Amino acid sequence: MIKTITGKLKNIFSFGLNKILRDDDGVGVVEVILILLVLVGLVIIFKDQVVALAKTIFQNINSQVNSI
């Protein structure tokens, strides 16, 4: 289930990235690369917390669905 969510997030992110790269309003390649580096750094730093949060959320969802 987490793999499908991450796949959807990758699709959304790649669509947004393509839109940014095609836009000619002065956004340079260097700025896009810097933003990507910051995002990747944040993902690496907070990976464990994000995974734990996602697991907790899905466990709560599953327990509430089972109680219905």
Image (cartoon, helix red, strand yellow):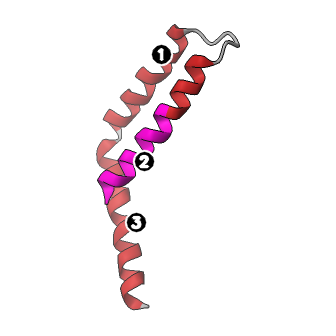
Q: Nearer the viewer, residue 26 or 67?
A: 26
Q: Is residue 13 left or right of residue 66?
A: right
Q: Position of residue 59 (x, y in %)?
A: 34, 71
Q: Residues within 10 Å of mark 2 (few under 14, many from 20)?
A: few
Q: Is residue 12 above or below residue 35?
A: below
Q: Is residue 56 left or right of residue 32?
A: left
Q: Nearer the viewer, residue 44 or 22?
A: 22
- Report the magenta residues as a range: 1-14
Magenta region, mostly helix, strand or loop? helix
3 or 1: tag closer to the N-terminus:
1
The residue shown at (36%, 47%) is: 6
Q: Position of residue 11 (x, y in %)?
A: 44, 40
**What SS does tag 3 mark?**
helix
Q: Nearer the viewer, mark 2 or mark 1?
A: 2
Give the residue type that dot 3 points to: Ile
**What SS does tag 2 mark?**
helix
Numbered badge on residue 57: 3
Query: Label 2 belongs to which residue?
Result: 8
Q: Is residue 1 above or below residue 19?
A: below
**What SS does tag 1 mark?**
helix
Q: Nearer the viewer, residue 52 or 27?
A: 27
Q: Is residue 17 left or right of residue 58?
A: right
Query: Label 1 belongs to which residue?
Result: 34
Q: Nearer the viewer, residue 63 or 3?
A: 3
Q: Residue furthest bottom?
A: 68
Numbered badge on residue 52: none
Q: Quadrant of residue 22?
A: top right
The residue shown at (39%, 74%) is: 60
Q: Quadrant of residue 24?
A: top right
Q: Residues within 10 Å of mark 3 (few under 14, many from 20)?
A: few
Give the residue type that dot 2 points to: Lys
Residue 8 magenta-highlighted = yes
